[in-house]
Image (cartoon, rainbow, N blue to C red):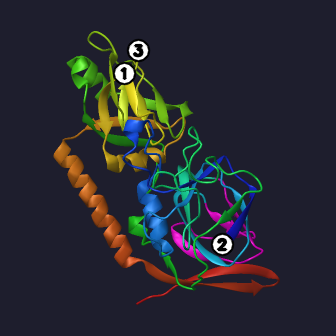
Amino acid sequence: MECFKVINPGLFTSVQDMGRFGYERQGVPVSGVMDEFSFRVANMLVGNAENTPALEITLLGPTLEVLQDTVVAVTGAWMRPVVDGREMPCWSSFPVRKGETLSFAPVKAGCRAYMAVLGGFAGDTVMGSVSTYTRGGIGGVKGRRLEKGDILSREGDEFFAHFFKVREEYIPHYSSEEEIRIILGPQHDYFSRESLELFLNSTYTITKDADRMGYRLDGPEIKAKEKHDIITDGILPGAVQIPGNGKPIIMLKDAQTTGGYAKIATVVSTDLSKLAQLKPGDRINFRAISLQEAHQLLQKMEYVLDDIRKTLVPSRYFDVTVDGTVYNVNIELLK
């Protein structure tokens, strides 16, 4: 069912789910959301299954005309949704009505926001996923980012008046400098102890060459013992390559599936969501941890998501007019 018309697409807005798995050997990357944590919570807030397609919004949000009454939620980057001039809360679900305009305030922190809609956004399913992979022209809306005039549909036609918000202690706080945890390897033996120490003790800046494929970093050059090239092997999101110039590249969701540069480290899966909220000019420090610690972090994230699911706070929305000005009032229901 048609639910939104794109008036302005924003900088880079696309339909994403958690990705398409099992096709890397055929050269098709996983793709999918950059910040899995925020995406899953957005779907929780509107009552969807956690892998339901949503919009991934980068830095500058879209302007959408609402074509039918529905419920949406916005999580991730602090990019407040605005409905007909009224600011709505982030990390909450709220109603939008036919004829209203939904837009987004300038981003204050973070890089990517996620907008879920009740029932989920419809899109082209390719290899079991709706995720947009623009380089391959598959998934989402005609395999590309949103454009002016696009009509976005959602699955189902239900509407409910139950709205929820995430408890404050579970909402991430985004910074312009982050510690990113890694596991060394698989080719860390290509580098001397001194090079590894330099890599781990340096601060790197994300350059303007940063997108869904990867982040190129600026900082100290990491030299290999002999050469940076390897026999081409597989690449997964989070792999940290060191090319000939010694400047690290973090491969992300739309990265190619094979590569010929030595991989000094791999970002742990939980910290890919942190990376997704960093933008050009932000800084990164790396910290090496064990595989066991990485597993514990993943388990902890699942525990947090389970707690969020169990402790969503019910709320209600009312339009209140005072001296001709309409205010949207959110009332939190206390138990």
Q: Nearer the viewer, mark 2 or mark 3?
A: 2
Residue in the picture at 42% in, 77% down: 312
Q: Which residue, given by chain and number where applicable, does mark 1 sit on?
A: 261
Which comes sooner in the sequence, label 1 or label 2? Answer: 2
Kind of residue sitting beneath label 2: Met
Where does the magenta region start and end? 80-106
What kind of element bears circle 2? loop
Residue furthest out toward the bottom = 335
The residue at which mark 3 appears reads as: 244
Q: Secondary structure at mark 3?
A: loop
The span from disc 2 to disc 3 (Cα, nearest Å) is 51 Å
- In the image, taking residue 237 as reference, residue 77 lies left or right, namely right
Up/down of 52 relative to 316, above or below? above
Residue with the mark numbered 2: 1
Classify 10 Å Cα crowding around label 3: few (below 14), some (14-19), many (20 and above): some
Instruction: Single out the mark in the foreground, 3 or 1.
Output: 1
